[in-house]
Amino acid sequence: MRSVRLALSFALCAGAFFTSTIACGGEEGGESGATRATLVLDYLPNGVHAGVYEALSSGAYLDEGIDLKIITPTSTADTIRLIQADKADFGLADGMDIATQISAGRDVRAVMAVTQRPSGGLITLAEEGIRSPADLGGRTVGVTGVPSDVAVFETMVEDAGGSPGQSKVVTVGFGGIQALLAGRISAFTGYIPADATVVESRGVRTKSFAFDDFGGPSYPGLVAFSTGSRIAGDPELAEGFVNATTAGYRQALKNPEEAISAMAESVPELDPELALRTFLAYRPLIGGAEELGSIDPASVVELSDFMVERKLIPKPIDPEQFDGAP
């Protein structure tokens, strides 16, 4: 849903770290002779990344012969550009962003799903008394300005039996939380496990409506991806990355507190309590042990059909174009 996420307070210190750490991945000579590889996150480290840091802390990547470095971008768009420019090996992004890139003819392929369902939807305050998206008629709704946000809003309101045209839609960038708490909007499109958790951490009750509960496709919301050429050139690296990351999330699901503690050791600026609450909110979207990391072809078809219908992409995407897992 969000193509760009601003790293506000972190931007200055991240900039120096970001430029100094990025290097071509897949190089030999890492720790204990392991292959050096890089993973670019989709945003600042938060609870949804717990499995990655658990795998790093437990040595799961090294067990697969990978010396993994984690990079924090200043935007999701940066993540995609770095992968395409061969400046990093793997990245994290929303499945809809990956589908958009594939539709545009770019050599991007998902290697695993971090979440089996999208985390996006509409977030409002409990005190607003909104019982469904249809109740947003006559109200002001915030969107980031990304085209898919409007498509999400319109789909959800229409599915609930309402009329999107009755609402006033305003662009708030990534200030949805602040605008909601200030009373400038009645709801906004956002990532429910992350954004609603932040609001509730401030002692304010929220009411959220999931995208795939109101007409939206149930697709892999957050995926790890690379390029088709990189996967084909080093399938063992891609397979090892998937194995280690899956193991990390499997352990994080078993012991969330341990995973967040491991994460906090690597990310000193992390708020462990908020990160734990965020991970627990994401946990139902990650899926059970059997489906962990997998990409269901039917979910890709569902996403593709939705994006074509809403004119976000010109033609359907074949699941084999989306899933490049070795």
Image (cartoon, rainbow, N blue to C red):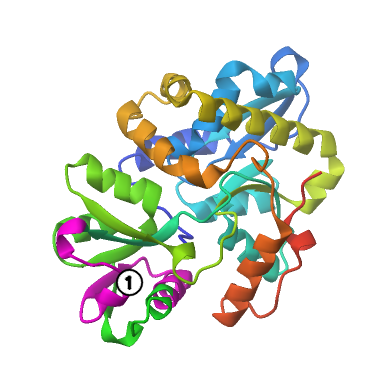
Type of residue at label 1?
Pro
Q: Is residue 135 magenta?
A: yes
- Give the residue pinned by disc 1: 133
| Residue positioned 69% across, 79% down in the render | 315
Q: Is residue 253 magenta?
A: no
| Residue positioned 59% across, 23% down in the render | 56
Kindly state the secondary structure of the residue where label 1 is placed: helix
| Residue positioned 28% across, 44% down in the render | 198
| Residue positioned 43% across, 37% down in the render | 279
Place of residue 162 in the rendered image (x, y in percent of width and height, measured from the top left): 34, 82
Place of residue 209 in the rendered image (x, y in percent of width and height, measured from the top left): 36, 61
In the image, residue 161 above or below residue 79: below
Q: Which residues are magenta?
A: 126-155
267 relative to 235 in the view: left or right: left
Place of residue 222 in the rendered image (x, y in percent of width and height, measured from the top left): 55, 50
User: Between 86 and 90, which is closer to the camera in this rendering?
Assistant: 90
User: Between 170 and 278, which is closer to the camera in this rendering?
Assistant: 278
Place of residue 298 in the rendered image (x, y in percent of width and height, measured from the top left): 70, 62
274 relative to 32 in the view: left or right: left
